[in-house]
Amino acid sequence: MKNLKVYNTLVHKKELFHPLRKDRVGLYTCGPTVYNYAHIGNLRTYIFEDVLRRTLEYARYKVKHVMNITDVGHLTSDEDEGEDKLERAAEKEKRSVWDIAKFYTDAFLRDLVSLDIKRAHVLSPATKNIKEEIAIIQELFKKGYAYETSHAVYFNISKFKNYTKLSRQKLSEKITGAREEVVLDSEKRNPQDFALWFKRVGRFENHIMHWHSPWGDGFPGWHIECSAISTKYLGQPFDIHTGGVDHINVHHTNEIAQSEGAYGKPLARIWMHGEFLLINEAKMAKSAGSFYTLHTLTEKNFSPLAVRYLVLTAHYRSKLNFTWESLKAAQNSLERLYDFVRNIKGSTSTSSGTKNDIVRAKLRTYLEKYRNKFEKTIFDDLNTPKALAVVWELIREYNKNPKKFPAKEVLTLLYDFDKVLGLGLKNIQSEKIPKKILALVKRREKLRKDQKWEDADKIREEIQQLGYTLEDTSQGTKVRNLIIRNLRFPIPSLQGNPRSRAAGNSLRD
Ligand code: AMP
Ligand code: ZN
């Protein structure tokens, strides 16, 4: 095992990582609220979590990764105000709430595939864990942390010692649902109390998703699902819990209160948080309307993995401001990296054969230096920008004197680095364009010369159907393989179970 250090929000410093059980790591990452497409800000957080999981696996830990899917109970404000995000989307899109959940869950899973993000071993929607959510609330009643009003069941934060230990906020600084909630529910004891269960009364009288509970018909509050799902699959405590920084003050603070209140032991040992992706120096957010989805970017011919590369250029605990220039630069770097891999693949057989054993052993030691450097940076709280710098240092060194290095071993080293970076280096193939495609390109060029634009466009479409894209430049038409460029990606098939259409059949209950 390696000397992996990670920043733990709970203690505000980097700590040497030790798993609770030898060689095994329980990892819980808060999942998406499936009422809309994920934007690339959300995806930045999932990329950070993927790098974390890959780093743990690189360090030879056996990771069990669990993620929830929020398909009920997340209101338009994190502080229990407003409407249920899914029900609002269903109304707006004139579709059933179950269809909305299924549709956006599938879209999320496709985004994961395009970004080479490993899917959690357990992916479980809130609506499939109602029994477990109710059980924790009952436990909270037994321990005196929960109380019931005519509108809801709340967690009484004044009973829980050290409620704001994760955020270190003063209680008075906490934004509360006081404004609307107190007006709606005058029986609420403290403005900062948060809902564990909403009753199907008052503003939620017509709530579509609802279940029986000891407190009447209703639906769970947003935070309880993560307490229920994490403990169900990972036990309590488990090793690492993650999310975006916006979860520190509300969602994770409340998860801790619920789980620790119910079972009297810590929920997770380490809490890690990814910083925001910004746009025009402000948080990328759906509510502000200032966001891009992956689809918007791929339509502009950016590869999803260019987005991943861009995200890796910043440390996960630093803010990153999105600009088109930076995305273009990331795509260029990625293409240069792919070109390097393509070239070196071609030279694999020749350069290593000529060296004698002593020279080879020396070069291997030399390459180990790069491996050590890479590991040192990535094990230092996932320093991806420095890790990328090591990759480029190695490439520069190789390019200075390609004959000096055993190409095969350089490639092996890069593939190993890519186990953490996830830039799809192993999928890089030689970009030989089939004769059939070249013939179509020629035909299209002729049609363009004859100004038969519509026919030329039809051929472009045919070429695209076959997995290639065209770029008209001043030097002629360039053909590129879309699959190699990772602009096209397989769509995971998720057939909905008719009884629980909120999620695909690969999801767990
Ligand atoms: P949601 O689907 O709204 O529950 O958010 C999914 C994840 O994205 C959460 O972990 C959020 O903390 C995170 N997130 C939301 N906005 C951003 C952003 N602009 N940059 C990075 N992460 C974000
Ligand atoms: Zn959560």
Image: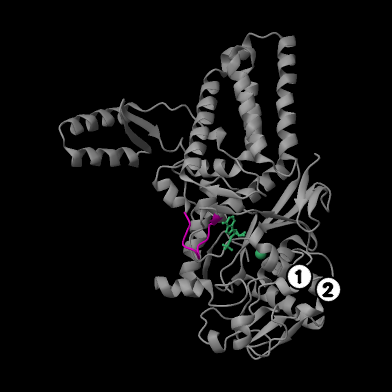
Residue type, mark 1 in image:
Lys
Mark 1 CB lies closer than 8 A to ligand 1: no
Q: Quadrant of residue 4?
A: top right
At x 72%, y 10%, the residue is 359
- SS at mark 2 in the image: loop
Q: Position of residue 504 (x, y in %)?
A: 53, 62
Residue 326, can we see it?
Answer: yes
Does the segment drawn in magenta span residue 288? yes
Q: Is residue 189 above or below residue 234?
A: below
Q: Position of residue 356 (x, y in %)?
A: 70, 8
Depth check: give the residue in front, 193 or 211.
Answer: 193
Q: From which residue to which does the magenta span run?
A: 282-292
Quadrant placement of the N terminus: top right
Q: Residues within 10 Å of mark 1 (few under 14, many from 20)?
A: few
Depth check: give the residue in front, 248 or 281.
Answer: 281
At x 39%, y 47%, the residue is 299
- SS at mark 1 in the image: loop
Quadrant placement of the C terminus: bottom right
Image side of residue 186 versus residue 156, left or right = left
Q: Is residue 493 above or below residue 324?
A: below
- The residue at which mark 2 appears reads as 161
- The residue at which mark 1 appears reads as 170
Image depth: mark 2 or mark 1 in front = 1
Q: Residues within 10 Å of mark 2 (few under 14, many from 20)?
A: few
Depth check: give the residue in front, 418 or 335.
Answer: 335
Residue type, mark 2 in image:
Lys
Does the segment drawn in magenta span residue 450? no
